[in-house]
Image (cartoon, grey):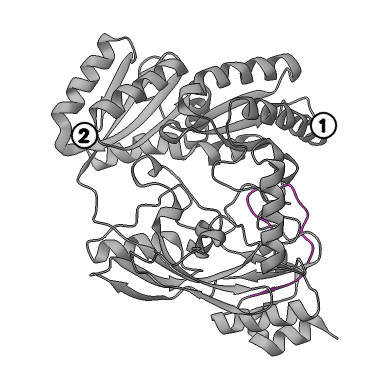
Amino acid sequence: MNITQELCAIIGKDSVILDAQKDHFALDYTRKFSPKTIAAVFPKSTNEVSEILKFCSKNKIAVVPSGGRTGLSGGAVAANGEIILSLAKMNQIFELSLLDQTLHCQAGVVTKEIQKKALDFDLYFPVDFASVGSSQIGGNIATNAGGIKVIRYGLMRQWVAGLQVVLASGEILDLKNTCIKNNTGYDLKQLFIGSEGTLGVITECIVKLTTPPPELLTSLYALNSLENVVELFKLAKSSLTLSAFEFFTQKALEKVKTYMKLKSPFEKDHSHYVVLESDAKESSNLEKFVEHAFNKGLIVDGLIAQSSTQAQEFWGLRENISESLSQLAVVHKNDISIPISKISQFSFELNKLIEKNYPGIEVIVFGHIGDGNLHINYLKPEKLSKEDFFKQAQHADLKMFELVKSFQGSISAEHGIGLTKKDFLHFTKSENEISYMKQIKKVFDPQNIMNQGKVF
């Protein structure tokens, strides 16, 4: 059997990449793995996905479902001779229902396109993050994406009304019943949300839409400690209707300033900064909030955006951190979540741990205080080789995840488990939970061909 000839026969030669270009589709943002794949295939319909998986199941060929590949956990990596099944050509939007406030599309539609389509009809898709211009909705669902609006709108899971999924056997599972009240036992679509492509391939989805938010005010504050950041969030939550509450440090700001060639937003440097987004109709409440925060000593300086351009500038300080770090240094990235009430103590313990055991490694932390999500970045010291740095970083991960467990946190807040965190899953999931997860995997993928080696 010639695998590549069979694939070409199933979906056409023009939809199969066999040369070195396929390696581009074998990696995600982790950049830690070497690509090794048979081919990259680009089906255009659910039926074509079904035929590909029937062939792969029959011949026990492993498959890696692929979206925008913006993840940071190796979930879309093909490094062991798999077939990459890309949803990039499955990018049709079928229908937008004004009455139901839903949008039905294929899984390869770029997230930003859904946001634009919704706005065309005076509706709103609230799942939002820095990579919306390249991520795909199927990948968002498969990783239960979050982002900067979680504090107000929740995770991707809250915005999925229906799914169409192709199982490893090629069977098409139609889970597109969008009735608000559907109390008929197990909701199978929830199993595929956050499953990282290990149970099947999401080919179509129906996402919920909502009314656009009111006009928003964006403000930027300077603070002198993480404790004050948490206290400021507590005050903001009781005073304002929040859409976002993000923080970053002076260390992070310095990297953005260097890479983006920007000036500091304030005359003096401060240890921490907060970008806050609240309803403009509450402008008087915002003024009272700022006055109260100053009087309590929580903030030492602040700016309220006077235009949409200035608001974008404030957001740029936060959203350009990841890119700036990646361009200026060798970085080992992590995203975790900690109960909000324990963030300050956790950060203190983490800094102590790194300083004691890994001198020379710079740690830059930023993230979503409103949902307890911290992005933790280790930067390689100049004198340390890449190989030694990543060894140290992996060892530091082990110590950090032990700390995360002691604070009842999660080792992954946004990007899933993939390849990079599967050895640490037990720090968040119990032995029983992992056992049941493996049993579910066997039900839907008995031959273990779907995203083999990910999560477990």
Extreme right residue here?
1
Among numbered discs 2 and 1, the one appearing first in the sequence: 2
The amino acid at mark 2 is: Gln
Image point (28%, 16%), residue name: 293
Overall secondary structure of the magenta stretch?
Answer: loop
Extreme bottom residue here?
9
The amino acid at mark 1 is: Asp
Q: Is residue 44 visible?
A: no
Name the mark on residue 248: none
Label 1 sits on a secondary structure element that is: helix
**Residue 355: x, y in percent?**
69, 15
Residue nearest the viewer, comparing 188 with 11:
188
Residue nearest the viewer, comparing 77 with 397:
397
Q: Please tell me whether residue 288 is drawn above or below residue 200 in the rendered image.
A: above
Label 2 sits on a secondary structure element that is: loop
Q: Give left or right: position of 185 versus 210.
A: right
Q: Residues within 10 Å of mark 1 (few under 14, many from 20)?
A: few
Question: What residue is disc 1 on?
Answer: 388
**Residue 402: x, y in percent?**
69, 28
Region of the chain picked out in magenta, as a range = 27-41
**Residue 368: x, y in percent?**
45, 34
Question: What residue is disc 2 on?
Answer: 306
Q: Residues within 10 Å of mark 2 (few under 14, many from 20)?
A: few
- Quadrant assignment, res 166: bottom right
Image point (23%, 15%), residue name: 292
Cα–Cα span, label 2 and label 1: 47 Å
Q: Give left or right: position of 191 versus 422.
A: left
- Quadrant assignment, res 161: bottom left
Q: Is residue 20 visible?
A: yes
- Quadrant assignment, res 116: bottom left
**Residue 6: x, y in percent?**
76, 86
